[in-house]
Image: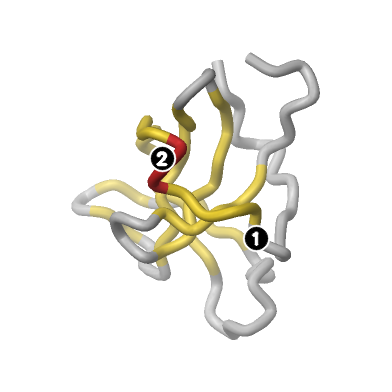
Amino acid sequence: MNPKFHKHFRIYYKSGHPAYIVGETKDSFYFHRVTSSPKSGHHSNWKIYPNPDKRRKTPMFIVHQESKDLKIYFSMKLPFNKRIDFINKK
């Protein structure tokens, strides 16, 4: 992992929604999906309030499950990047 890496948001092209990037390898990112729903299935999501995306008035929720995908499926960093320290990549 890159020692200068900082957690940030990017658009995940497969879903069209933001993703919270928590780690990276040479060719992929580890990320949590972002949603506007308080639940994903029967699992509760982490609530981020106020929403770092100032264009939206609803709170942001981050899904607990961590995913991994290739970097080509992500946009450049989004301008509303905010560190959310309670999500730790292990």
Give me the residue at 36% from left, 36% from top.
65
Residue 61 located left or right of residue 55: left
Tell whether label 2 touches label 1 (CB within 8 Å). no
Q: CA distance from mark 1 to mark 2?
A: 21 Å
Residue 42 located left or right of residue 27: left
Badge 2 amino acid: His
Give me the residue at 66% from left, 46% from top.
8
Q: Which mark is residue 64?
A: 2
Kind of element beneath mark 2: strand
- Between 65 and 69, the one lying in front of the other is 69
Kind of element beneath mark 1: loop
Give me the residue at 20% from left, 53% from top.
41
Instruction: Using the rendered view, name the quadrant where residue 68 is placed.
Output: top left
Badge 1 amino acid: Leu
Give me the residue at 38% from left, 33% from top.
70
Quadrant of the rendering where the N terminus is positioned: top right
Number of marks drawn? 2
**Which circle's residue, 1 or 2, is located before the other in the chain?**
2
Number of other residues with Cα within 10 Å of mark 2, as a class: few under 14, some 14 to 19, many 20 or more: some
- Compared to residue 83, the image places residue 6 above or below, namely above
Residue placed under numbered mark 1 in the picture: 78
Question: x%, y% of residue 14?
Answer: 29, 55
Question: x%, y% of residue 77?
Answer: 65, 53
Number of other residues with Cα within 10 Å of mark 1, as a class: few under 14, some 14 to 19, many 20 or more: some
In the picture as drawn, the residue positioned furthest to the left comes out as: 41
- Between 85 and 42, the one lying in front of the other is 85
